[in-house]
Image (tube, helix red, strand yellow):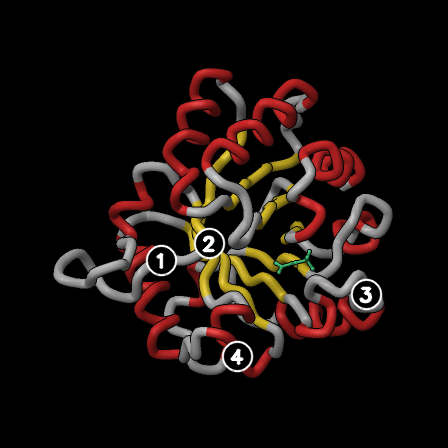
Amino acid sequence: MKKVLIVGNFKSNKTEKESSEWFEKFSENYQQNFEKEVVICPSFTSLSSLSKLIEEKNLDIFLGAQDVSSFEEGPFTGEVSARQIKEFCKYSLVGHSERREKFSEDQAAINGKISNLIKAEIIPILCISEIEQLDRVGNLENCIIAYEPMHAIGTGEPLDPSLANDTLGKLRQKKSLGVLYGGSVDSKNISNYTSSFDGILVGTDSLDPLMFLQIINNA
Ligand code: PGA
């Protein structure tokens, strides 16, 4: 990956109106930077309005979904298919640890999601907390990996950068599009990770537009 990828994951936060307000504030202060690629992953309900705002302001910012259906289109009430998110998204998260843990998402479902995304030409950002979770992944070579140790997510206690780098070395041996670090990244610690990883995945500190801007500036 040539550019440093900075991905903000809003999780189940922000209404459509709040996401648009976030974006207004963010875009007032955002400066285009050709060495960094910024991706925002809001809820499905905010994808359409954020996509319009990005287009209106003609910014080099991309959208990602937080999840996608493991099924294709059809009688799957409540699911959102890869073709539906393709209208708005260049990327989609897959297999976030919150989904694996709280929604019992298994490898078969994750593989289905990855294959639907690739078919729709959306780049999967496959989240893992253990290297072993890559063992049965199909199509890994077309995914970006986001390495997020469980204990570092949302705790304010990121993984020690030297330990993160040990794992990065192992992840580099697998064929993928790139490797991100995630877990309690903030504007002060970000450069510890962007010096070796291809980018980062930020949850908590992406919720405030000015904090997210600071993260981008310091990446
Ligand atoms: P965090 O979340 O930045 O709040 O630790 C990261 C994530 O869950 O992707």
Mark 3 Cα shell of 10 Å, populated few (<14), some (14-19), many (≥20): few
Mark 2 secondary-structure assignment: loop
Residue type at the position of mark 1? Val
Could you tell me residue 203's position as x and y percent? 64, 53
Q: Nearer the viewer, mark 4 or mark 2?
A: 2
The numbered mark, 3 or 1, whose residue comes first in the sequence reads: 1
Q: Residue at x 54, y 43 (%)?
A: 14
Mark 1 secondary-structure assignment: loop
Q: Nearer the viewer, residue 160 or 169?
A: 160
**Which of the numbered marks, if any, corresponds to residue 157?**
3
State the residue position of label 4.
133
Mark 4 Cα shell of 10 Å, populated few (<14), some (14-19), many (≥20): few
Separation (CA) of disc 4 from disc 3: 22 Å
Reply above or below: 197 against 150.
above
**Which of the numbered marks, if any, corresponds to residue 66?**
2
Q: Residue at x 27, y 54 (%)?
A: 81
The numbered mark, 1 or 4, whose residue comes first in the sequence reads: 1
Residue type at the position of mark 3? Glu
Mark 4 secondary-structure assignment: helix
Q: Is mark 4 within 8 Å of ligand 1?
A: no
Q: Is mark 1 within 8 Å of ligand 1?
A: no
Residue 108 in the figure: left or right of residue 96: left
Reply above or below: 107 against 77.
below
Separation (CA) of disc 3 from disc 1: 29 Å
Could you tell me residue 61's position as x and y percent? 53, 31
